[in-house]
Structures are given as C-alpha cells and as structure tokens.
C-alpha cells in the first residue's frame, strides 16, 4: 500500500537548531514519517534570499541535516536532502513565477514583515518570490500534506492557487496539498522573554535552548528562566507565560500531560519545576547532540548520505518537471 506523500523543510540554521525547531517541527516530522511517505528538505535556496556567508551556509546546511537525523528523521525510509542539490526546484519556481500575479505576490505578509526589517531597498527580489519557490518545493513531490507553523499558512494557500491555476491552464498536473498546522501545544517560548516564541533571532542568548548546547549549559538556562512573583504553579499562558512554558516543555519532553504535572507540583516551588524541566531537557537533548556531533565528525560520509538522498528526490522531481515542461510547450 502506498502512503500519502508529505513534504516539509527548514532553512539551514547557523549554529544549531533550537528547542522550538526541535519540538515544533522535528518531533512532529519524526512521528509523521511513519504514516506518510515523507520528504524533508534543507532549503538552502531559500537561505540566500537574505545576505549570507558562503562558508557559514555550507556548514549550516550540514549541521541542520545532521540534527534532522539525530532527532530521528530516518534518511533510509524518508527522503532527507538539500534543496540546491535538485535543480528542478529553481526550474519549476521560474515557471510558477510566470503564473503569479505581481499583486498576488505583494500580498504575502511574510515578505512585508521581513522586508520592513531590512528596508525595502535592501530586500532582494528573491525574498519577494520566496513563496513561489516554496510552492515549487511542494508541488514537485505531489505532496498531499505540508506540516508547517501557522505563519506559513498563506504560502501553502498560494501553492494550492498556483497548482490549481497550472492544472486549469495546461491540464491536470499537480496534486494540491493540504496544510497541516503544527499543534499550538508544541510551541516553545523564549525563557527570558516568555511572551515571545523562542527564535534563532531572539535577543537574549540565555533565552534560547540550542539542541547542540552542552548539558550543563541547557540546565543553567532552564534554571535561570524568567517566571513571575507569585508562587503558584498552574498552566495559564496569558497570566503566567514563563511557568506555562516550563510546564509545556516538561510535558512534551517528559511525556506527562500538563494537568498531571500541575497536580504533582501543587504546594511545591518554582525551583522544583525548573530543576525537573532542566533534567527533562538534558535527557532529551543530550543523545541528539551526541548523535549529531558523531555525524558531523565525518562530513564526507554525511555528504555521501545527502547525495544519495538527493538522487532519490531528483527522481521524483525531474519526472514532475518533465511533465510540466511538456505541457507548457518546451
Ligand atoms: P526561527 O523562528 O528560529 O527563525 P524558523 O522560522 O526557521 O525558526 O522555523 C523553522 C521551523 O521550526 C518551523 O516549522 C517553525 O514552525 C518551527 N518553530 C520555530 N520556532 C518555534 C517555536 N518557538 N516553537 C515551536 N515551533 C517553532
Ligand atoms: Na521565523
């Protein structure tokens, strides 16, 4: 029986992925890869839409792939590859560019956010057409589901619109993907600024738990998490964002539902909550870190593995592209 196809991707991340990427994306992917025929991509073509350093990008791509594998993405049953290794992504993106209205692309809110941070003169046209490349990523693989965060919903809608438009104009070619929004319960907040989600661009270095942090560093960060002045341990993200963030971290990494944790911590202090959460974070991340460092110690082997997976991706993508080229008259 063939399983439905799933596609998802993440940009290469310089130093390390963080707890948000791990819990919000990798753990979901790891579980989904069982029921789906999963294709996971390190989207380095997307990474060059903002200024980047070549040596850092190359290293970041390897490090990101190593962390996917270390977190449980199986590169034998799933496909795990690097976007720039498969030229069909850029080729299909060009075709889709010609089907996208300028006004339609201008309505993408992520571009508005990112370009306003850079200043609109500094923003590249590549940043503007980013969602169209993302549409190509998904459509090339006949993906039926695309698990992403809420911020990507608009891009998957554009993907469906472009796929539908192509199908209508040139004949049935693309599968229209469904968005699968990653669960809100898998959201991780900055330890120092628990009103904001944990992000690689977070302002306080102590607020971000990196998957490749040493265990002692992880424990220290959790123990210095910002909480609040009252001493009540309950789950209330609006009133008690710091405490609630620790409870959800402990719940997802320790495997106990939040209400059971709240019962357990009745009458106990924040120190206990922090120390149990620190233990859970260390227990979850340390083996992932070790495995990732092992993979990174042999970059030639990792590159071979990624090249083999790129061949598997290429086989699917080039078949789709050949159909597209034929239908548009190439
Ligand atoms: P960042 O916000 O650090 O730039 P990305 O936007 O590159 O992270 O996110 C990559 C993936 O990780 C996405 O699937 C996103 O939904 C997930 N993710 C990022 N930050 C978090 C977070 N704090 N909590 C849960 N998931 C997150
Ligand atoms: Na982001």
Image (cartoon, rainbow, N blue to C red):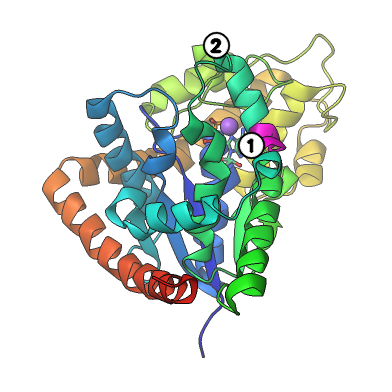
Secondary structure type for disc 1: helix
Report x, y in % for residue 294: 22, 44
Q: Residues within 10 Å of mark 1 (few under 14, many from 20)?
A: many
- Choose between 300 and 286: the one closer to the eye: 300
Indicate which quadrant contains ligand 2.
top right
N-term-proximal mark, 2 vs 1: 2
Could you tell me if residue 84 is visible in this image?
yes
- Choose between 255 and 124: the one closer to the eye: 124
Q: Is residue 198 magenta?
A: no
Which residue is the site of mark 2? 204
Q: Main secondary structure of the magenta part?
A: helix
Which residue is the site of mark 1? 249
Secondary structure type for disc 2: loop
Horizontal side of residue 205 vs 254, given as left or right: left
Which callout, 2 or 1, points to the residue nearer the camera?
2
The span shown in magenta is 106-110
């Amino acid at each position: 029986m063939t399983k439905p196809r799933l596609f998802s991707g993440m940009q290469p991340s310089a130093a390390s992925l963080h707890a948000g990427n791990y819990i919000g994306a990798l753990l979901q992917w790891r579980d989904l890869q069982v029921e789906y025929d999963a294709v996971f991509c390190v989207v380095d073509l997307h990474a060059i839409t903002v200024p980047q350093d070549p040596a850092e990008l190359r290293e970041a791509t390897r490090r990101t792939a190593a962390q996917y594998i270390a977190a449980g993405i199986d590169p034998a049953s799933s496909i795990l590859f690097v976007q720039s290794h498969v030229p069909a992504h850029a080729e299909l993106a060009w075709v889709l560019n010609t089907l996208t209205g300028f006004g339609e692309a201008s309505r993408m809110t992520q571009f508005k956010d990112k370009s306003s941070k850079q200043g609109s003169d500094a923003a590249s046209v590549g940043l503007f057409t980013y969602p169209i490349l993302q549409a190509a990523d998904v459509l090339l693989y006949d993906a039926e589901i695309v698990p992403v965060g809420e911020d990507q919903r608009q891009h998957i809608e554009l993907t469906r619109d472009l796929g539908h438009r192509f199908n209508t104009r040139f004949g049935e070619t693309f599968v229209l993907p469904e968005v699968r929004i990653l669960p809100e319960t898998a959201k991780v907040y900055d330890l120092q600024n628990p009103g904001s989600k944990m992000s690689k661009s977070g302002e306080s270095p102590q607020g971000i738990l990196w998957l490749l942090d040493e265990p002692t560093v992880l424990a220290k960060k959790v123990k210095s998490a910002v909480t609040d002045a009252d001493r009540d341990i309950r789950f209330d993200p609006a009133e008690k964002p710091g405490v609630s963030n620790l409870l959800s971290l402990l719940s997802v990494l320790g495997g106990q539902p939040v209400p059971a944790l709240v019962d357990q911590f009745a009458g106990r202090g924040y120190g206990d909550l922090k120390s149990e959460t620190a233990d859970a974070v260390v227990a979850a991340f340390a083996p992932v870190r070790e495995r990732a460092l092992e993979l990174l110690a042999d970059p030639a082997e990792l590159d071979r593995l990624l090249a083999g997976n790129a061949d598997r991706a290429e086989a699917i993508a080039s078949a789709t592209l050949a159909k597209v080229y034929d239908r548009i008259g190439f």
